[in-house]
Image (spheres, rainbow, N blue to C red):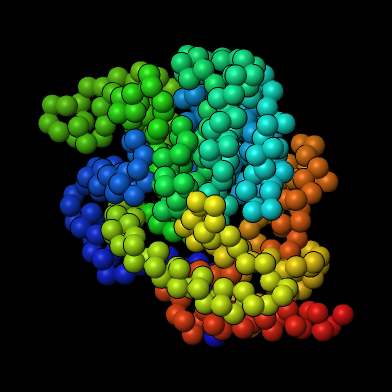
Amino acid sequence: MKIPFSPPYIDDSVIAEVNDSLRSGWITTGPKVKALEAEIKQLSGAGEVLCVNSWTTGAIMMLRWLGVGEGDEVIVPAYTYCATALAVMWAGAKPVLVDAGEDFNISVEGIRRAITPRTKAIIPVDIAGFPCDYDAIMSIVSEPDVKAMFKPTSAVMKQLGRIAVISDAAHSIGSRYNGKRSGSETDIAIFSLHAVKNITTAEGGAICLNMPAPFDNSKLYTELRMMSLNCQTKDAFTKSKAGGWRYDIVGMGMKANMADVNAAIGLAQIRQYDKLLQERKRVFGIYDKVLGEKAWAITPPEVCEGRESSRHVYALRIKGFTEEQRDEMISKIAAREVAVNVHFIPLPMLTLFRLRGYNINDYPQAYKNYSHEISLPCYPQLTDEQAMYVAQSVAEAYAEVVGSK
Ligand SMILES: *Cc1c(COP(=O)(O)O)cnc(C)c1O
């Protein structure tokens, strides 16, 4: 039985919505993007939502809007996808890596220790869709001594008066934290709508704006929308109307807008969000049932301490396994035609970061999480029978690895 890792969810309604866009005569940013923004706003509870062409571009744009640049530091976890740190580097600042906790997410104590007068933002990541402890993180940035240390270097930073928290919610659309929904807990949150994520537009991202007063999120939306279109005073739709040709460029913007034809995919998916989440829960349930009773398996956090995961990835860990044993186990699973993954290779183990002086020995929990982690496929189309086959393949592979010693 061949099991792919993460095929996109494409049903008739997705195809109909894309067709509708293609036949409408307008395929780039327009009504489908607006409709998707409204849906994401409703699902997340965010103040405003702006769709862009990827998480990465959205994060670079928001760091630049904040005024982050040369000489600044931004705190990011060592255990994440490279984009979290690359966005900081493209903004011109230095990513300061912090070790993970037991639950995969950035260590809150580690954040506190990493703050310096150069710290301008923190980017926590909801690994596998399990939310970070946002009450703790938001309270750190508001502590009087942390605020006193803060040195704003832009008008936006001055107005905020403290370190900004931008959550990397790439995995966590639909997650919940203490009654709040992912996308509404931090100043800014960014979802990824990349092809492997829970809701996708093939490539895309959504920026959630929850800036505190005196910021006005609806004004900010208008400003950022223009910034995502090269800071051009007129969008392509307005310009395409007869007589509407003249425009101005009023700042150094970026080209980060999402196209309607892309938005159409996500629009059809997000309208069925509840159903899609139920299907993910079903798959998690099967894995939990089979693997939860194995003494060697550490099943991923799903619902605990007021937090509920979007169940983006089933991040299984094998107790006491070394990296070599884990790799061997993945080969044995692959031999059964089941595609699995590892989330994530810690950044200091990747060439770019290693060459810049980051050392994995400084991030022992990130290494530990990585060395015995195997992500199992989890998506709505996975049938009970397939999920059972995956779980059994994992159990058999474990027995072979342990037996072969
Ligand atoms: C996928 C992912 C990103 C990047 O998203 P893009 O939309 O591809 O730019 C960033 N952070 C994490 C944790 C991710 O998994």
Residue at 75% in and 68% down = 319
Residue at 57% in and 73% down = 288
Q: At which x and y percent is residue 178?
A: 46, 46
Q: Is residue 255 left or right of residue 389?
A: left
Q: In the displayed image of the protein, which residue is found farthest to the front?
A: 305
User: Is 334 or 188 nearer to us in this picture?
Assistant: 188
User: Is 381 or 308 nearer to us in this picture?
Assistant: 308
Residue 348, by quadrant, is top right
Q: Is residue 57 visible?
A: no
| Picture mark count | 0
User: Is 122 or 224 nearer to us in this picture?
Assistant: 122
Q: The C terminus appears in which quarter of the rendering?
A: bottom right
Q: The N terminus appears in which quarter of the rendering?
A: bottom right
Residue 21, by quadrant, is bottom left
Q: Is residue 301 above or below residue 39?
A: below
Residue at 33% in and 36% down = 48
